[in-house]
Image: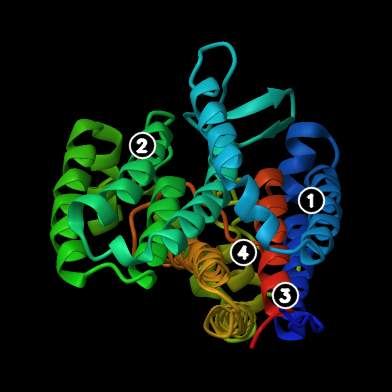
Amino acid sequence: MGKSRSAPDIWIIIPTLLLLTIGIIMVYSASSVLAFREFGDSLYYLKRQLIFAVLGVVAMFVTMNVDYLVWKKISKITLFICFGMLVIVLIPGVGVVRGGARSWLGIGAFGIQPSEFMKIGMILYLSKMLSEQQSKITLFTKGLLPPLGIMGLAFGLIMLQPDLGTGAVLVGASLLIIFTSGARLLHLSYLGMIGIAGFIGLVIAAPYRLKRITAFLDPWQDPLGAGYQSIQSLYAIGPGGLVGLGLGMSRQKYSYLPEPQTDFIFSIIAEELGFIGGTLVLLLFTILVWRGMRAAITAPDTFASLIAVGIIGMVAVQVIINIGVVIGMFPVTGITLPFISAGGSSLTLMLTSVGILLNISRYSR
């Protein structure tokens, strides 16, 4: 193949494993009270997180040693399977409803979230498609519309669950790939205006989303309803100060802050570890994004470069949305903090994706 293989980028591995370690510690700290109340076992969420962390790290090291060109060969069937799972999860009695969304397939406490698989499936397929048809991407009808159509179909199926947070991450990562492949900014600007109009339509169509928007603008209008999560999150962050209340000393985890081990785990980090702890987490994500973009720039071919852009874009968009929600910059939407929040599908798929990124870094020019 004419490629020289070297060691993977250690500066991708280090922040990933450090974030994973912080996540395991904080999942226990944030969830122990909730786990004891619901299951009589304060280690319940910790045990699950450790299982998925081990599975994810194994998957990361496996994919790190699988030539990235393998994904080019199976990207079409992978996307087809992901679409199939998105359809199956919508069938009443098959898809499991959690948190108001029919987003899960599984039995009991264990399940998979098809929309998480779709994120990486879409990245792989678009990377293949656009690397092979790069000369057409400046053409609106023949070049830009086909990848946008596939992305739009996946987004539509995810919104039927509904899961706006995951859908937004998928769209964000996909658009980064499309832009990087050479799409015209003018075309994307027009589509952006259409997208804003569509978003407004989605908000108007679902009263609960409109409540989230109004609660975002002024959470004190409904402090016990739509504004509750935002207010409780800020109550956690505020007392943290510079150095925090101390590990395990959160007050908000005592049934005040909903989902302290998943969507709002950064609130607990800020409360217990303070500004310094929160800044450390953001610094690790910054290092990971920087090295991921470096891998994209130095990748041996366009396919590898687009995959790297998609994976690091997926991580960055998810971090921005999650922390933006936690600090009150965005309306509340259910989305996890990569590598840190409790969650099996998200954690395992994120680590698997980092493994693909590490493999690309092995062939950097």
C-alpha span from label 1 to label 4:
17 Å
Given this view, does label 1 or label 3 mark the residue nearer the observer? Answer: 1
Q: Which residue lies under the disc numbered 4?
A: 268
Q: Mark 4 belongs to which amino acid?
A: Ile
Given this view, does label 4 or label 3 mark the residue nearer the observer? Answer: 4
**Of callouts 1 and 4, the N-terminal one:** 1
For the question of whether residue 162 can be seen, the reply is yes
Q: Is residue 200 above or below residue 280?
A: above
- Which quadrant of the rendered structure holds the N terminus? bottom right
In the displayed structure, does residue 287 sit left or right of residue 3? left
Given this view, does label 4 or label 2 mark the residue nearer the observer? Answer: 2
Residue 289 percent across, percent down from the top left: 56, 78
C-alpha span from label 2 to label 1:
32 Å
Q: Mark 3 belongs to which amino acid?
A: Gly
Q: Mark 2 belongs to which amino acid?
A: Leu
**Of callouts 2 and 3, the N-terminal one:** 2
